[in-house]
Each structure stands twice: as C-alpha cells, then as structure tokens.
Image (tube, rainbow, N blue to C red):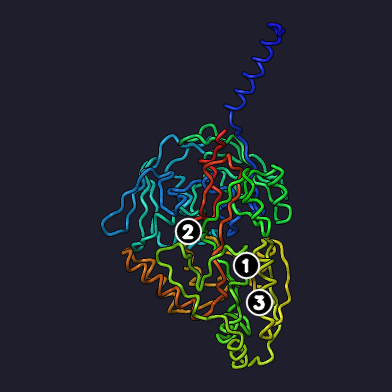
Amino acid sequence: MKTFATMLGAAAVLLASGSAALCARTDLVVGVVLEPPHLDPTAGAAAAIDEIVYANVFEGLTRIGPNGEVEPALAESWEVSDDGLTYNFKLREGVTFHDGTTFEAEDVKFSLDRARAEDSTNAQKVLFSAIENVEAVDPTTVRVTLKHPQGAFPYNMGWGDAVIVAPESADANKEKPVGTGPFKFDNWAKGASVTISKYADYWGKPVALEKAEFRFIPDAAAAVPALLSGDVQAFTNLQAGDALPQIEADPRFEVVIGATEGETILATNNGKAPFDNLKVRQAIAHALNRDEIILGASSGNGVPIGSHFSPANAAYIDLTDTYPHDVEKAKALLAEAGHPDGFSATLKLPPPPYARQGGEIVASQLREIGIELEIIPVEWAQWLEQVFTNKDYDLSIVSHTEPNDINIYARDDYYFNYNNPAFDAVMEELDATTDPDKRKELFGTAQRIIAEDAVNGFLFQMPKTGVWDAKLEGMWENAPIQANDLTKVRWTD
C-alpha cells in the first residue's frame, strides 16, 4: 500500500516533468562551414560575416526578408520624392546599441558617409555610389539625396554592407561587434565558434532564443556525426553528400532544399594569358559538363546556370545552351587560340566542399581538352588575400552569394579582371532605371553579354540544404541574402 509521502513524491515528479515539457529549450547550436575573417559586415566581402551577424546583431534602415522582399528595419517608413531623388526615412524611437548608446539620425549619417567615403573599406561601396548627400534632419528623420534615381535604393540599404553602426564602436566591430539587433555579441572562440545572446533592451519583438552558437565545422565528414549526435541542432546549408538520404529518413530531422543567391562559378582571371583570349574561355565553357559537376559538388541539387544570375529571379533567362558541352569543339577552339596541345594552369580552391569536390571534377573535364590544372587548396583567409584582393590566380571555384550582384562585372579592378564598356553602359542605365519592365530587359541584356564573353565558367546555383531538429521552427527555407537569420527561430516544445 502506497504511503501519502510516496504519492506526494510521485506527484512532485509528475509536476516537475510536466513543467519541463512546457518549458521549451532556448539555446541553439548552428553549424556553419566557414569561420569569418572578422565580424564587421561593413568592412569585408566574406559571406561568412553576414551569415552570423546580419539581422541578428546588426540592422540597417531596411532589411531583406525570407522571400527577398524589402522590409522596414531601423527605418519604420520612408517617403520618396516624385523625381525619385530624395528619400525621407522615419527612424524608430527607443532604439539603443548593445553598449547602451542611443541610436539616432546622426548614426545613420555617420554610417552612410563612412561607407561611401573615398577611403572606405566597404566591399560593396557601389551600393552607396548614387548618394549625393545625407542629412540628419532631426533625431528621428534622415534625408538622403541621390545624384540620380536608383530603383534598387531601398533594397541596397537592406544589404549587410549597409547596416548602421555607431561612431563610438565602429572601429572595434571587427572583433567586438556592437549593433542594434535582437542578439548581442558574447564571445568569439577563434577556430571554434561565435556565441550571441538575447539583447534585453531590443526595440522590437524579443527573440525566443536566449543564446545561439555558430560552430565552425569545415569538414563535411565531421558535420553529419555532429548533427546525428545532437551536438549541433541545425545546419543552414549542410554539405551532407551521400549521407543526405539517411538524414532525410530520420524523423528527428527536417530537411528542406531551398534556393540561394549563390552563383557558383569557375572564376577566371580575364586579365592574364591565356585567359585573356576569348577563344580559350569559350573552349573552357564547352569543356564543362554541368550535370557531372552538380552531381559531385552539390549532391545533384544545384540548378545549372549559363550566366551570373539566379534562376529564382523574375529577370532570369536560361543561357545554359550558349556554350553546350562539346569536347571536340573545345579542342578546336583551343587550337584556334594557339594552344593545340593545351597548356598548364593553377586552380585555387577554398575550403567549402562544393569547391574542393567540384574542383576535382572540373580538373578532370579540362584535362580532356589538354588543360592540365594544378589544384592548390587554400584556406578562406588565403583565398580572400590571394584571389579576391591580389588577383594572384588563374582559375578558382567560388559561390557568389550576394543578391542581384551581376554589377560586379562592371567594377574597376574586380578580381575577374573583366572590362567591357558595353556591359558597363548597361549597368549604368540599369542603375538609373526605376521602371520594372525596363529593368528586367536590361538585366537580360547584361546576362547575355557576360555569357557570350564566357567571362567565367558558369556552373550552378547553389542549393540551400537546410537540416535541423524537427522541433525547431522559424528557420529560413531559402537564402535571398547571405544570412542565418535567427530572429524568429524557436523550439516548439
């Protein structure tokens, strides 16, 4: 016969377990492939920076939503003059930076002026090139005057490169980022992880997570065991390879294949012989078998592309048949270019599996036409220094994850070393065009020019293979911008 004490103890256990069931966990470990070189999105080109801090730690006047739409952020609203030259942004009140300083119009002026300054280190300085003047009208109003109408201006202000920073903390943001977002920076264990936590004084709706850790797992072979063991609860883009079917069959996980803005390319140094010869680049384009590359580099989930443009964009045109796979045609073009026996070159590959695995396949395909590639694996920091900054490379493989970034082909001194005045003219007209139909037409023209010039080997649009605990909700299915936005992520029990 049970005693009263026994029954009371049992009731206490039931109450405790019931309370535990009602209290969903509030921590999360997210696995990411690359460690960022630093944590200031206004001072670096690495997507790995935004993948941690965008929308979580830093905010801009606007933000890009999960479907690529422009949403209010630190600006609750804005008005545009009839001539399209003046934007009046109404700022939110009661906003503070994580160090307690007040956010106001002068911070916006500081950030935009800093980004467009002559000595700016902003990797996307072109986003601010149309700005003529920035005026802090009063603490909650900013007036931005443009040199010419720019149809994409509110969208541009939603990039990670356009987040608002404070003059008091801007210089230290690389190591200790201070933003206005719903999470504040806690710790960066170099080589291991970055930890952020809930900011108690956030101006908007509080986030459900109290703490989140971004753990760096560059080795695909280590990623799957980390997920299966529960050490990591989410990978926003898991490089699972042959293990993906096993994970899909496991009811503990949700697998969502989404779209990204990541144009994966065989980056080519157009300013270096023999790649400055159009026929050589055309030969390479004909030698590439996208289906084989996609199968080996993205588990068959990538979408073939023939130019630097996302298939998810309404202005996309299919140019994959511009240079169809044709080994004999490729050999003939090489001979016409003066290389009947081929040549040797280098292929520098950053750490992501799509690059390392894809590089092996590309090297094999180019070997068929007589091009012998020496594969040189490099770490991410080396890639940024050698390839992106110093242009010390022949070929490389990388995924450009910035949204709508076809304008990079018009930038002076960009690492492709591509120069085409006709393309530059299209970009200049596009920048000043607000009519949606005309913009779509110009985007099509731009795609055709770089496709026909075979500027790079256009391979595939990177899929977003999201894998996370089935009890999580609020993770992004697609990646319209290079971000791992945790602001609406929560555990369901």
The crowding category of the residue bearing disc 3, from other C-alpha atoms within 10 Å (few below 14, some 14 to 19, many at least 20), is many
- Identified by mark 2, the residue type is Arg
Label 1 and label 2: CA atoms lie apart by 42 Å
- Identified by mark 3, the residue type is Asp
Q: How many marks?
A: 3
SS class of the residue under badge 1?
A: helix
Choose between 377 and 61: the one closer to the eye: 377
SS class of the residue under badge 3?
A: loop
Residue appearing at x 62%, y 18% in the figure: 15
SS class of the residue under badge 2?
A: helix
Q: Quadrant of the C terminus?
A: top right
- Identified by mark 1, the residue type is Leu
Question: From the viewer's perspective, is residue 408 above or below residue 280?
Answer: above
In the image, which is nearer the foreground, mark 3 or mark 2?
3
Q: Position of residue 59 (x, y in %)?
A: 49, 46
User: In the picture, residue 232 is in which quadrant?
Assistant: top right
Residue marked by disc 3:
394
Camera sees residue 37: no
Choose between 222 and 243: the one closer to the eye: 243
The crowding category of the residue bearing disc 1, from other C-alpha atoms within 10 Å (few below 14, some 14 to 19, many at least 20), is some
Q: Is residue 285 left or right of residue 141?
A: right
Residue appearing at x 49%, y 37% in the figure: 96
Residue appearing at x 69%, y 70% in the figure: 348
Q: Position of residue 313 (x, y in %)?
A: 43, 63
Q: Quadrant of the N terminus?
A: top right
The crowding category of the residue bearing disc 2, from other C-alpha atoms within 10 Å (few below 14, some 14 to 19, many at least 20), is many
Residue 295, numbered circle = 1
Q: Position of residue 4 (x, y in %)?
A: 68, 6
